[in-house]
Amino acid sequence: MSEKPRVGIFGMTSCYGCQLEIINLEENILRLLDHVNISYWRLALETPSDPKNLDIAIIEGSASNQEEIEELREIRQNSKIVITIGACAALGGVQGMRNLMNNERVMSAAYSNLSGVRATEVKAIHEVIKVDYAVRGCPINKEEFAAAILHLLAGTQPPAWNMPVCNECKIKGNECFFERKKPLPHYQSRVCLGPISEAGCGARCPSNGMPCDGCRGWTEDAHVKQWIKEGLERNQTIEDLAMLVHRYSGGTKDSEIAKE
Ligand code: SF4
Ligand code: SF4
Ligand code: SF4
């Protein structure tokens, strides 16, 4: 039998929630292990081996300091395929909002009693190295992750969605937040990002009574300015709308359009 592909799983700046989703695959992780050899995983293996000669590197988190940028370059050199997992890696994540603030102020507010903390601009992984595929979401959907790995191992491309969350939401027959007439409680009253956010989650949040927060990033042709206009017409402030559109892609290049 030929040797199984070698896989490494790496965590950059993140909450580690997407790696935990992989662990949550439970019995399905055993099926995945029929196909791959997890050679490096600091979070889950007692004795991770040398993270070199990998067939697939799986990266969670964003690059937030020089050490992570250098580690990412090494991972790329040592891996045939690089995939990212989660909004932090694909978009910069919540911590990307730091890029919109003064770095010294952030550092003194967050780490005033700590020395040796090094933080630079937050970057999505594709801003540092070439990425072959991104599993999106905060956190990722574990089944979507497992399917993506199997596709990549088979040499096929995992499905691309290229449509907004609204499409999946309509198929599910949800009542649209934009069309509700009676006042909504505070936790439901923020403007739904479904019209500009990439589908693939099955409209998870609107199906459970919450507006979409855009954790999968924007669709390629997202009409962000139109969405902002709709929000202003619904008495939202520009500050609240800016916070919503920047929530997952803060100050990374992907959010440039919203800064205009
Ligand atoms: S995408 Fe969300 S769940 Fe995943 S590491 Fe980032 S913050 Fe955590
Ligand atoms: S995703 Fe949001 S905006 Fe789109 S149809 Fe559903 S509730 Fe309406
Ligand atoms: S509905 Fe929006 S915020 Fe919720 S999981 Fe889907 S893309 Fe993410």
Image: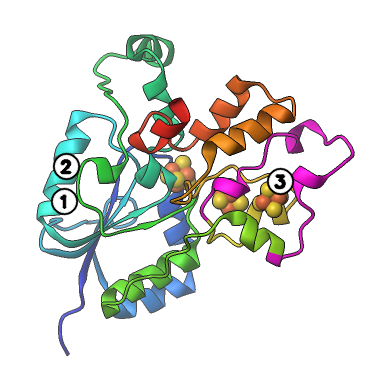
Circle 3 packing at 10 Å, graded few (<14), some (14-19), many (20+), is some
Q: Is residue 191 above or below residue 43?
A: above
Is 182 magenta? The answer is yes
Q: Is residue 99 above or below residue 202?
A: above
Q: Tell me: is circle 3 under 8 Å from ligand 3.
A: yes
Name the residue beneath numbered marker 2: 71
Instruction: Say the numbered circle drawn on residue 75.
Output: 1
- Disc 3 marks a residue whose amino acid type is Met
Instruction: Tell me whether the residue at label 2 lies in contact with that at label 1, contact meaning CB atoms closer than 8 angstroms.
Output: yes
- The mark lying in front, picked from 3 and 1, is 3
- Which residues, given as a range, are shown in magenta? 171-198
Left or right: where does residue 156 sit relative to residue 227?
A: left
Quarter location, residue 231 = top right
Image quadrant of ligand 1 equals top left
Quarter location, residue 12 = top left
Residue 213 image offset from top left, x and y in percent:
59, 42
Name the quadrant of the C terminus: top left
Name the residue: 28% across, 23% down.
Answer: 119
Q: Tell me: is circle 2 under 8 Å from ligand 1.
A: no
Q: Tell me: is circle 1 under 8 Å from ligand 1.
A: no
Name the residue: 56% across, 59% down.
Answer: 201
Quarter location, residue 249 = top left
Name the residue beneath numbered marker 3: 210
**At numbered mark 1, what does the secondary structure look like: helix, strand or loop?**
helix
As measured in the structure, the alpha-carbon distance from the residue carrying label 3 to the one carrying label 2 is 37 Å
- Disc 2 marks a residue whose amino acid type is Glu
